[in-house]
Amino acid sequence: MTLDRFGRNINYLRISLTDKCNLRCVYCMPEDITFRPRQELLQDDEILRLVRIFAELGFVKFRLTGGEPTVRANFVDLVRQMSNTPGVETMAMTTNGLLLDKLAEPLAEAGLQRVNISIDTLDAQKFKKLTRWGEVDEVLDGIRMAEKAGLGVKLNAVVVRGYNDGEDVVDLARLTLYQPWQVRFIEMMPFGDVADFQQAGIVTEEDLRGTISAALGDLSLVNNGQLDGEARLYKLAGAQGTLGFISSVTQPFCASCTRARLTADGRLRLCLLREQEVNLMKPLRDGANDEALKEIIVDAIWWKPWGHKLDDDVVPLNRVMSEIGG
Ligand code: SAM
Ligand code: SF4
């Protein structure tokens, strides 16, 4: 068990497999972003070694993210090897879904259990504007293929004022009336070069719930408000699925946070919204043994921060979202 100084048991690692992506969502990265050279990123053997070490330290849940994890070379094989690591109980992925039509089945066969698929609107034109060139139909195909492959599916939408904060939110919420899905709305968070845009365009959970209930009726709280992961769940009357709200900006869930993040360039990031990181790549490449790496990780986790400082205008500037892995 790896505890931090607040007594939180940190047992969930989100791994950014690459900073690269086949989209350029406006809330995630600038259009002209420069990606890191390959040698600066963790190699397959380095990732597998770290997954084994984290599992030996008591981490049980692993989520692959990015950038877009599915664009990484040798991805299915990497998932297979990670899933087969002793101690790994849950292997999940967050993806834009574009490559799932071909990858969903091999990934399920390789041991992937769940996917969170990002889809911010069902409107083709607005989807293109938000992602800069994406085709929403390809994501819908990806969702269908993920379900067919037996993967657990949740949908994620980041809401941006002026882009998808009106009928788009209502259309996404309406899906839960007919599908047993969890559709989750994420408050946009500020990072790096894109922070001004993000802070100007944030739509809060309170506003979102207002928009949805004005169009589709009252929302009832599920499980007395107990969080499902990071999401607070609600239900529309008669709905098959649920609505989740991930409100890291206005209602942070630090008390129940169990996660740490491994960036694509091998830094252990202790909190998404704080710049504090510990370099694992350097000792790894300098020949540190497992015990030495475990000591660094255990110490880093102990100092995991509590709470963001956005109210004091402290915005994490050292990276954009795609480098950290959302
Ligand atoms: N490419 C994959 C995807 O889009 O699902 C995985 C990486 S992406 C960085 C992970 C999640 O972070 C996605 O659900 C995305 O919508 C979300 N995200 C990206 N930028 C964000 C921001 N500024 N605030 C909140 N969520 C953000
Ligand atoms: Fe790519 Fe995901 Fe970022 Fe969109 S949110 S640019 S799909 S990494």
Image (cartoon, rainbow, N blue to C red):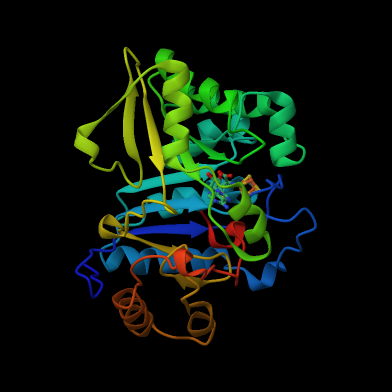
Q: Please tell me in which quadrant of the rendered image residue 130 appears.
A: top right
What residue is rendered at 28% in x and 63% in y?
A: 10
Q: 18 and 43: which one is in front? A: 18
Q: From this viewpoint, which residue is outermost toward the right?
A: 32
What residue is rendered at 61% in x and 29% in y?
A: 121
What residue is rendered at 76% in x and 41% in y?
A: 132
Residue 229 in the image, given as x and y percentages of width and height: 32, 46
What residue is rendered at 62% in x and 31% in y?
A: 102
Q: Please tell me in which quadrant of the rendered image residue 128 appears.
A: top right
Residue 75 falls left or right of residue 39: left
Residue 259 seen in render: yes
Residue 100 falls left or right of residue 269: right
- Rendered view: 122 above or below 74: above
Q: 143 and 77: which one is in front? A: 143
Residue 293 in the image, given as x and y percentages of width and height: 38, 80
Q: 98 and 198: which one is in front? A: 198
Q: Quadrant of the N terminus?
A: bottom left
Residue 199 in the image, given as x and y percentages of width and height: 59, 55
Residue 151 seen in render: no
Exactly how many numbered labels are in the figure? Answer: 0
Residue 207 in the image, given as x and y percentages of width and height: 47, 36
- Rendered view: 85 above or below 137: below
